[in-house]
Image (cartoon, helix red, strand yellow):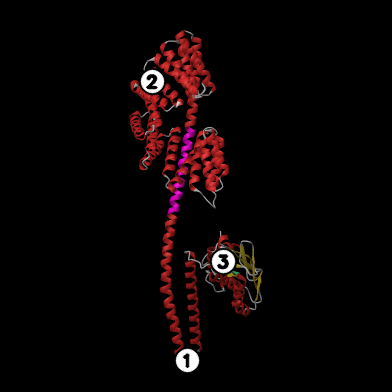
Amino acid sequence: MADHIQTLEARVAQATAREDHVDALNALAREIRRTDVRRALSMAQQANTLACAPSHSYPRGQADSLLTLSTCNRLLGQNEQALAQALEALAVYQQLNDLTGQQATLSHLGALYCNLGEYPTALDFQLQFLSLAEQSGDLRNQSTAALQIGFTYSEMGRYAETFPYYDRGLTLCQACGDIQTEARILNSYCVDSTNIGEYSKALAHGRRSLQIFETIGDVYGQGVALGSIGEAQAAAGQYAEALESLLQALGVLRAAGNDLNSYEAICISYQIGLANLRRGDLDQALLHLQQTLASASAAQIKIVEYQCHERLAELFERRGDLRQALEHYRLFHAKREQVFNETSDQKLKNLEVLHRTQQAFAEAERQKQLREDDRHYFEQLAKLQREFFSTATHDLKNPLSGLSLGIDLLELHITPTDKDAFEILAGMRGGIERMIHLIADILDLAKLETGRALVIEPIMIAPLLRMLVQDHRLAADQKQLTLDLQVELGDLAIECDAAQLRRALDNLISNAIKYTPIGGRVTLIARYTPADMIIKVIDTGIGIPTHDLPHLFERFYRIHDADHLEIEGTGLGLAIVKAIVEQHGGQVWAESQLGAGSIFSLRMPLSRAHAR
Ligand code: ADP
């Protein structure tokens, strides 16, 4: 065991890859959780943090650590956390379709709910455990599940359902040769048969259980089995045999390293006192009951404490020492009431825990459903969008080309002196061009937003920017604007889709020119950091109100003030810029001061490796 722990510790220390590290931490935490639960908790916590790192999540490691965290919290009595973590682990294992993980978690959840006294829910999980074990043909897990289900029914006092599950478990154990579980089932069989007064059955099963524990050398198991046999014998009135079994049980437990203050030893010692009392050996009874009382109060096992007081009261009454008898009766009632109050307090707390967990669970389900609805909605929307855009191309573009042709023909038919007619036709042509432009923008945006593949190649940035400035020079001159370019890039190349980047910058520069009054200045600045290129388009134009800034990049967004609206536009240019930049793994943002000017900045990763 110690060697095994050392090996696991070495594995943790040597692990370099994140997944190995998580697995090693989980394995170590699982191993030490019974001996050093706090350390196990911290290991599992570390594993969980590593496994959930957003850049590189490792769901299986996450689920394993959640399950270990849950078992540690159960050992520490933190039921609420234990439940939440186990339910989360189950959800992850389900997503991964990991049947083994699901079975371990379902079995653990069954035990947790059983502990909380919430038997129907416990059964629900245990039955799921059984059915998954059946599905995966795992006979060992099937027998464990059958034992757990039988045990839960026994806790509910529903013995008619208990025994068929024990029988089923026994058959399964025999089929797969799992004699350890077989012995545990036989022991439970013995205890529950005693509870319903079937002593000969109890003894037969108890003895078989003892035999198996002896065969496999499980000393602790032998102690437990001898205790159950002793109790069955005492209940059947076979006091001498009972005492022999119970004393043997104590000896065996001691040999197994169990001190006399362990829970099992205290229960057996109480049984010895009781058997002596029943057979009338009051001196021995007194001795054992007093010893048991001392150990039980030291170990704070209150139920055994009050049981001892009750028996001692009975004993002193039989001896005629009424003063002592009365004192023990008084203590018996006081302790029992305390236990009763504590149990009902605990039950109330458990109920609260269950209620909160169920609420959290229901909320998680609701969120899942909403996400599912959203996904469905967006899929429908995307489909509609695709249909609309293909209709738009054919149904809108074609007639527009027809109209344009019509205008060309009309121009041939009107007399050159008819200025009004020419003006009307020019206006119509302008309108058609704007519509063609708008349709092209909508189509481009749609293609970008549905993830059109980029044509990525290394592009020299400085020449591209110079070319762009040249393209816009005429428009700038017409408004007497100074158009500047400041590049600090040298021969820098970036990996991008040149046509798309050009399109994005084109939109920003035309906006700057459009929204800057005559005589102003538009400046393009480009520089780079080790991972990114940053381009800024700065103008001394009309600016943008602060409250409009967060919406600028939404499609069809236009600023509703007279200065902006008098300038023609579609509200699509910036949405296209954003879609292009984001497809490259970059960012775009705007800063502005109304009446003073605006700065549009664009950050693009230099290479695809830097894209985030
Ligand atoms: P549009 O075709 O209307 O220009 P955009 O999406 O390119 O569409 O821009 C959205 C809105 O943002 C514009 O209508 C305009 O009001 C505002 N805007 C964009 N660029 C600037 C700028 N450089 N200065 C002032 N306002 C701007």
Specify which label sits upstream in the sequence, 1 or 3: 1
- Residue 59 or 430: which is nearer the viewer? 59
Residue displayed at 45% across by 13% down: 314
Q: Is residue 136 above or below residue 422?
A: above
Specify which label sits upstream in the sequence, 2 or 1: 2
**Residue at mark 3:** 495
Label 2 near ligand 1 (CB < 8 Å)? no
Q: Position of residue 458 (x, y in %)?
A: 56, 68
Report the Cα–Cα distance between label 2 and label 1: 121 Å
Q: Position of residue 557 (x, y in %)?
A: 53, 66
Displayed-image quarter of ligand 1:
bottom right
- Residue 58 or 300: which is nearer the viewer? 58
Overall secondary structure of the magenta stretch? helix
Q: Residues within 10 Å of mark 3 (few under 14, many from 20)?
A: some
**Residue at mark 2:** 232
- Residue 261 or 20: which is nearer the viewer? 20
Farthest-out residue, top: 320
Q: Position of residue 174 (x, y in %)?
A: 35, 32
81 left or right of 209? Answer: right
Q: Which amino acid type is marked by label 3?
A: Glu
2 left or right of 281? Answer: right
Task: Give the magenta range.
Answer: 348-372
Q: Position of residue 92 (x, y in %)?
A: 46, 46
Disc 1, SS: loop
Q: Is residue 373 above or below residue 66?
A: below
Residue displayed at 46% across by 49% down: 367
Q: Which amino acid type is marked by label 2?
A: Ala
Q: Are marks 3 and 2 in contact (CB under 8 Å)?
A: no
Q: Let me know if residue 92 appears in the view.
A: yes
Disc 3, SS: strand
Label 1 near ligand 1 (CB < 8 Å)? no
**Residue at mark 1:** 415
